[in-house]
Image: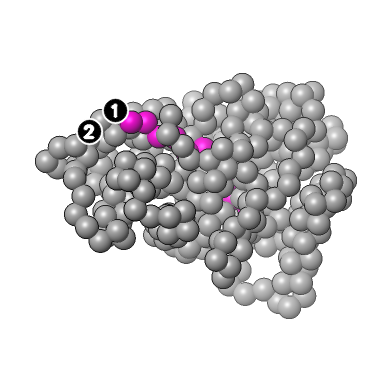
Amino acid sequence: MKSYFAPASTGNFSVGFDLLGAAFEPVDGSLFGDVLRIHGEQAENSLTLSGRYVHQLPQQTDDNLVLKCFYAFEQKIGRTLPRLQLELVKNLPVGSGLGSSACSIVVACYAFNDYFGKPLDDYQLLQLMAQLEGGVSGSVHYDNVAPSFYGGLLLMLPDSPLLCRTLPWFEHWQVVLCYPGTVLSTKEARAVLPQQLTLKHSIAFAGMLSRFISALYAWDEAEAFAALQDLVAEPARQHLMPELLPIREQLTAQGIGHVGISGAGPTIFAVCQNDVQAKFAADYLQQHYAKNSDAITTVCRLSRQGARAL
Ligand SMILES: Nc1ncnc2c1ncn2[C@@H]1O[C@H](COP(=O)(O)OP(=O)(O)O)[C@@H](O)[C@H]1O
Ligand SMILES: N[C@@H](CCOP(=O)(O)O)C(=O)O
């Protein structure tokens, strides 16, 4: 049996709509992401499902992204592959803003490529992942698949053969992620976005993202926090998450540097500079934002590692 893992990710990281994404792992060393097991080869593909969020997956395994990835991978490499006995351990909530669909896509594509002797290079594999993610969310965006695949904080580079590049990160930053337990589909959250930006708005967006990236390279933490502003998605999505502004007010009043929407929401992320802030944010979010038994609050650091064999 072979086991593979891919981590959770936060798309946008507030300031970089569709262009910035980060992979996270809990500071307690536990794994926060999906696991795919390949038990062996057989006449037909089969997929068994387990894990904390298995109940949020489609009833029909044929609708599961893991099998869609298998056939898309087979088509991409252009030869018929042996069928597999597969098991997905679904550890990330679906429609959560934690890159759940991307995580299953990344772990599946990574696993198939590794298992079948790496017929695709990283560039081809990432393109396939993004194309599959586009099929779920309605438009191709790399800001979840790329960090889940490579790890780290990544800047997408559209039209570059590199596709994305790793950015610097403040090592002491801890990111508290709180998923409230309610589902918000990425497709729906993308449908409320503006179709066009004015020239002034486009310049403001590009300016803020540039300011954040230059602050990272200059190791200027105050500037980095000042630049963590979402000028594109948050104004359009705020009504889907009415708790965001009061929560931000409470947490920033405690000195916490940034509070934003993880991906398309409803997960909220808080960027903290020390253990005291992280504990405060985690307790506060768990008390005021968690809504049911599906909710999860976790204190994370950047995951330098992306998809891998376990
Ligand atoms: N293995 C899987 N993991 C996550 N979602 C899956 C999977 N297989 C199928 N799906 C479907 O893909 C869609 C993912 O929804 P989406 O809002 O994009 O989630 P997320 O924002 O968490 O990535 C849902 O309709 C879900 O039922
Ligand atoms: N850039 C995308 C990110 C979606 O992330 P998800 O985790 O909610 O799928 C967007 O903001 O739509």
Whether the residues at callouts 2 and 1 have beta carbons within 8 Å, the answer is: yes
Residue 306 visible to an observer of this rendering: yes
Residue 203 figure quarter: bottom right
Count residues near mark 2 (Cα–Cα under 10 Å), then give few for <14, some for 14-19, many for 20+: few
The image position of residue 176, as x and y in percent, is: 67, 33
Left/right placement of residue 260 relative to residue 263 reads right
* Residue occupied by mark 1: 1
Say what secondary structure mark 2 lies in.
strand
Number of numbered discs = 2
Nearest the eye: 174 or 58: 174
Q: What's drawn in magenta, residue-wise?
A: 2-12
Residue 267 visible to an observer of this rendering: no
Residue sitting at x 61%, y 38%: 304
* Residue occupied by mark 2: 40
Q: Quadrant of the N terminus?
A: top left
Left/right placement of residue 124 relative to residue 218 reads left
- The response on whether ligand 1 sits within 8 Å of label 2 is no
Residue type (three-letter) at the residue carrying disc 1 = Met
Left/right placement of residue 93 relative to residue 165 reads left
Residue at the extreme left of the image, as rendered:
43
The image position of residue 47, as x and y in percent, is: 25, 37
Residue type (three-letter) at the residue carrying disc 2 = Gly
Nearest the eye: 143 or 214: 214
Marks 2 and 1, the one that precedes in the sequence: 1
